[in-house]
Amino acid sequence: MGKNHERIDGRLRTFIEEQHVFFTATSPLDADGTVNLSPKGVNGSFAVLDERTVAYLDFAGSNAETIAHLRENGRITLMWCAFQGPPNIVRVHGRGEPVFRDDPRFPGLLGRFPSVDPTAHGLRAIIVVSAELIRDTCGYGVPFMAYDEDRTLHADRFRREDDASLSAYFGKKEDIATSIDGLPGLPLPLPGLPAPASAG
């Protein structure tokens, strides 16, 4: 019942942008390495850049598996599923790249997320994904669940940090600079957070 799509537009784009949570999956090349699956859910932290390119903000966390896997091999799958309304699952299989704070592209990309205060969430990088396969399936087995509101705990925790203390926090974590399997993760020390580029 699945259908392949050439681009992210129309009802497909609308569906993706209406979801409150999505999931990312990555893995290292080593067959014995750790597969990573992560939920993402801060409203406004995902953007469709064009018909075959999407991006999301990568915030502070306990590890950096996605970043490490993308630095090693670039493979990533994003998935959205409908918990309300008609059943639907959308997957974007593609190649991803972490764009770090000191990358010249960072301010321009950050400007694509105008509704999110990056200083409140400990923004580490922006993940940019080029779609290679866009596919939707029925989602008949996904239960109905209601969205209430975003949790405030993440922002409450990380808005207390400035660039220096956030970098120190990452430096103390075991699986930030390197992945669980020892791959290079988030480059440290963390550069300062640049301002988003002006839309004008």
Image (cartoon, helix red, strand yellow):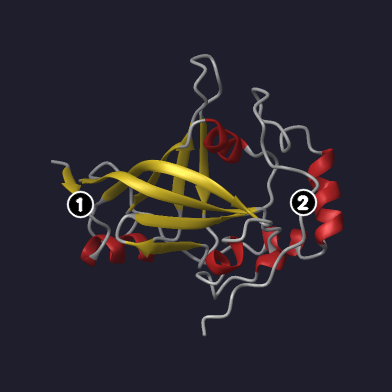
The image quadrant where one finds the N terminus is: top left
Disc assigned to residue 35: none
Name the residue beneath numbered marker 1: 6
Q: Measuring 34% from the left and 59% from the top, which residue is drawn there?
A: 16
**Real-space CA distance between mark 1 and mark 2, rounded to the nearest whole angstrom:** 37 Å
**Secondary structure category for the residue under label 2:** loop
Q: Measuring 77% from the left and 61% from the top, which residue is drawn there?
A: 192
Is 98 situated left or right of 185 in this image?
left
Question: Badges 1 and 2: C-beta atoms under 8 Å apart?
Answer: no
Q: Nearer the viewer, residue 145 or 65?
A: 65
Picture layout, residue 184 above or below residue 78: above
Amino acid found under the numbered disc labelled 1? Glu
User: Furthest-front residue in view?
Assistant: 104
| Residue 55, x across and y down, in percent | 47, 57
Amino acid found under the numbered disc labelled 2? Leu
Instruction: Please tell me which of labels 1 and 2 falls first in the chain.
Output: 1
Q: Nearer the viewer, residue 86 or 60?
A: 60
User: Furthest-top residue in view?
Assistant: 32
Name the residue beneath numbered marker 2: 190
User: Furthest-left residue in view?
Assistant: 1
Q: Nearer the viewer, residue 53 or 119?
A: 53
| Residue 183, x across and y down, in percent | 64, 27
Residue 198 sits in which quadrant?
bottom right
Q: Nearer the viewer, residue 24 or 167?
A: 167
| Residue 146, x across and y down, in percent | 41, 60
Is 131 situated left or right of 182 in this image?
left
Q: Measuring 71% from the left and 58% from the top, which residue is drawn there?
A: 122
- Packing grade of label 2 (10 A; few <14, some 14-19, many >=20) is some
**Secondary structure category for the residue under label 1:** loop
Q: Measuring 52% from the left and 63% from the top, which residue is drawn there?
A: 45
- Packing grade of label 1 (10 A; few <14, some 14-19, many >=20) is few
